[in-house]
Amino acid sequence: MSKRWYQDSRRDAWKRIARSKGYRTRSAYKLKQIQERFGVIRKGDAVLDVGCHPGGWTQVAVEEAGEEGLVIGVDLLATSPVDGASIIIGNITEEDTIARIKQTLGERELNVVVSDISPNLTGRYDTDQTISLELSTLVLDAAMEFIPHGGSFVTKIFQGTGIEGLIAAARDRFSNVRRYAPTASRSASSETYLICQNRLPRPRRKAQGKSALEQVQNHLSELGIVVEEESDEVEAKVGFRRIQKREEE
């Protein structure tokens, strides 16, 4: 029996379980396992799911927050309605989307931001990992717009260059930051999840006045990595798209 067959069989098992339980994706079980281990969502919480399409994590968030909770999903892609949740089509980095989230919240404040966001994979690991790092960093910055003192944040990250910079930026904003790899993830996957709990009243001194994106860029620079900004201003949605090593002098 090959290792590849075993991995595919286990992956398909989670997919079958998810389908039998009514979840849209097997990734729903990643959040369920995160919830079981860390209890990031409590009954009555207001939860924002960033990059919610196709809605598996939003379904789990609705279950965990309960009838008194409020769940908002946001994604660039249209997502089929999820019972018990409000779905917003938009870019989390844009003011219009942020305003719509705040309007949906009303007088409530968010307790938790979760994100299983992924780039459109190119098949080139360095490129995919870089874009994923960028997305996760931007979601962290966006989450800071909403998460109150004591709130939580969960995001997916891929192992590779620069993630220690993101983890450091998270630790400057939360008192408890851990990595966790759910068993529902593919065995061969390099993905892991950053579990950030208990947002600090204010960032630690070295992070004050800086965005997480700026901190990650500085970290990459210290590693000898050049951060190239997107040249097309119309298409640019985020701070950086590609990284490359400096030529040795």
Image (cartoon, rainbow, N blue to C red):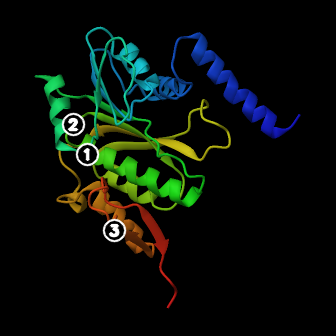
Q: Nearer the viewer, residue 55 or 3?
A: 55
Q: Is residue 197 above or below residue 203?
A: above
Proximity of marks 1 and 2: CB atoms separated by less than 8 Å: yes
Q: For the residues carrying marks 2 and 3, which lies nearer the camera in this image?
A: 2
Name the residue carrying label 2: 97
Work out which quarter of the rendered image holds the N terminus and state it: top right
Which mark, by number, is residue 93? 1
Name the residue carrying label 3: 218
Q: Is residue 98 above or below residue 48?
A: below
Which mark, by number, is residue 234? none
Q: Nearer the viewer, residue 125 or 159?
A: 125
Q: For the residues carrying marks 1 and 3, which lies nearer the camera in this image?
A: 1
Q: Secondary structure at mark 1?
A: loop
The residue sitting at the top extreme is: 67
CA gap, disc 2 and disc 3: 28 Å
CA gap, disc 1 and disc 3: 21 Å
Q: Amino acid at mark 1?
A: Thr
Left or right: residue 174 versus residue 38 is left
| Residue at 44% in and 64% down | 242
Q: Amino acid at mark 3?
A: Asn
Q: Amino acid at mark 2?
A: Thr
